[in-house]
Image: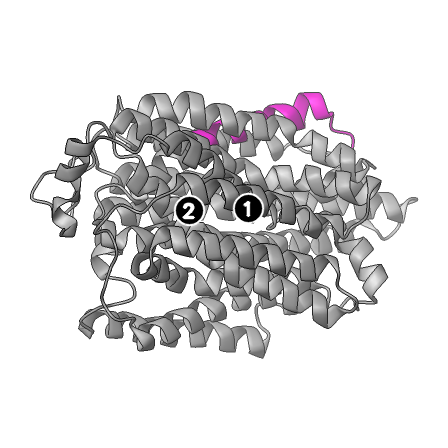
Amino acid sequence: MSETSQPAQERATGPDPGRWRALAFIATAQLMVVLDATIVNIALPSAQADLGISDANRQWVITAYALAFGGLLLLGGRVADMWGRKNTFLTGLVGFAVASAIGGAAANEAMMFASRALQGVFGALLAPAALSLLAITFTDGRERARAFGIFGAIAGGGGAVGLILGGLLTEYLDWRWVFFVNIPIAAVAFLGATATISDPAGSRNRSPLDIPGALLGTLGLVSLVYGFTRAESEGWSDNGTIAMFVSTVLLLAAFVLVERRVRAPLLPLRVVLNRNRGGVYLALGLAVIAMFGLFLFLTYYMQIVKGYSPIRTGAAFLPMVAGMVTGSTQIGARLMTRVPARYVMTPGLLVAATGMLTLTQLQLDSSYVSTLLPGMILLGLGLGSTFMPAMSLATYGVEPRDSGIASAMINTSQQVGGAIGTALLNTIAASATTSYVATHVAGTPSPELARLEGMVHGYTAAIWWAVGILTLAAVIAFVSVTAGKQSGHVATEDSGEEPAPAMAH
């Protein structure tokens, strides 16, 4: 059966009866991957002390995961298209669990760094396979909206949940449990997925793997993520940082040239040059830049300035998680089948920018209830409403053979956005803090108070940038995302049917 006859067959045979059970296990696996981006942050000080990791090397616990995950996502997406999403998904689950076991049992820093890199490798298989399974399993407009609402809530709120869980496990058990906890989660997801998930017939991409494209794309993304990571620790003018960015430009330019000429490209340019998908990738990447930087600042603000414990800090993020779940499942999912995506994404991003604007008012003595709480609720509602239609639209109307790579691109925009957000906003905050302290510490009766004030001043300076970034994302969403409402059956771009929205090319 050809790919192009897939929609017609689905209408004839009806939807997969086990699709909602499958969603539960796909979402469980996605939560595990998203959690791991932040859960380790809370446990890092304890792990560093136990394993004797130096201050200079501790960043590699985070960076090894980010480099492997971000660098290999495009390849993981194409592997899912070629080998089958279910096979790739299950392999990713097993590998992620094994890597987590190695991390939990780590006896030295080398073992820890290796486990984190392995988690990134298998996460790069798991994440695009999970999203593309969702895209090809839920083809009815209303059901797709509900499924992506749940998935979007997990993708958006998982990072904050990681902070909470990391605090609980570190404080009450041991830092090693932030790794071991993945093993039962992966086991449940594996057993459930084996029984409930199936690949639609004829949806694999049988083309040979584009080896030059895979090498150039992977090296280009690794160079990009490492460039921003290095900028955070070594500075933007460091020769190594500059070399990474120059390498990124050269490698990704060569990647585009190769993809235009090879018969079976790793990333078919039709996937990203589609106006709607391109707009979604860019707007979502910008939103993640703002969000990841904020997680870092609020964690430090609550623990260092306000003196919160790790558990209390994690619990303080719960309203943001609740906002994301509500925005995704109750606002985004309900509106997606009724109005065009831009009229959900644009207001969502502006609401998130308003929440961020509230947080620019942070002071040393700011009240959680009057400043942090409303800011986080607005952020959660806005981003939750945005993520949901964005994730759905990123895979909407894509040929089944390209669903893995389209899913990988949405993950790549989030991963690269996270690396940029952490480095860029952290650098802005550090620079503003240094300037403030230099002009305020001299002659003050309390240098320590001035240093804390400088820290908060740096955070608010960076949060102002985040407001601007979210506003820019809203403008891009409004201008670029021209698709109509996502309702009815999802047709593929080459199926001979018109997709329900007016997909602009």
Residue 343 relative to residue 367: left or right: left
Residue 469: in sight, yes or no? Answer: no
Label 1 or label 2, whichever comes before in sequence order: 1
- Disc 1 crowd rating (10 Å Cα; few below 14, some 14-19, many 20+) is many
Residue under the image location 75 percent in, 47 percent down: 454
* Residue closer to the observer: 469 or 230: 230
Residue at 29% x, 32% y: name it: 341
Does dot 2 land on a helix, a strand or a loop?
A: helix
| The magenta stretch spans residue 358 | no
Q: Nearer the viewer, residue 286 or 277?
A: 277
Looking at the picture, which amino acid does disc 1 mark?
Val
x then y, percent, for residue 10: 19, 36
Prevalent SS, magenta region: helix
Q: Write down the region rendered in magenta.
A: 365-385
- Say which quarter of the image contains residue 363: top right
**Residue type of the residue flagged with mark 2:** Ala
Q: Does the magenta stretch include residue 380?
A: yes
Q: Residue at x 65, y 32 (%)?
A: 317
Residue 487 percent across, percent down from the top left:
22, 27
Q: To which residue does mark 1 refer? A: 34
Front residue of 332/79: it is 79
Residue sticking out furthest to the left: 496
Q: Name the residue under label 2.
A: 130
Identify the secondary structure beneath mark 1.
Answer: helix
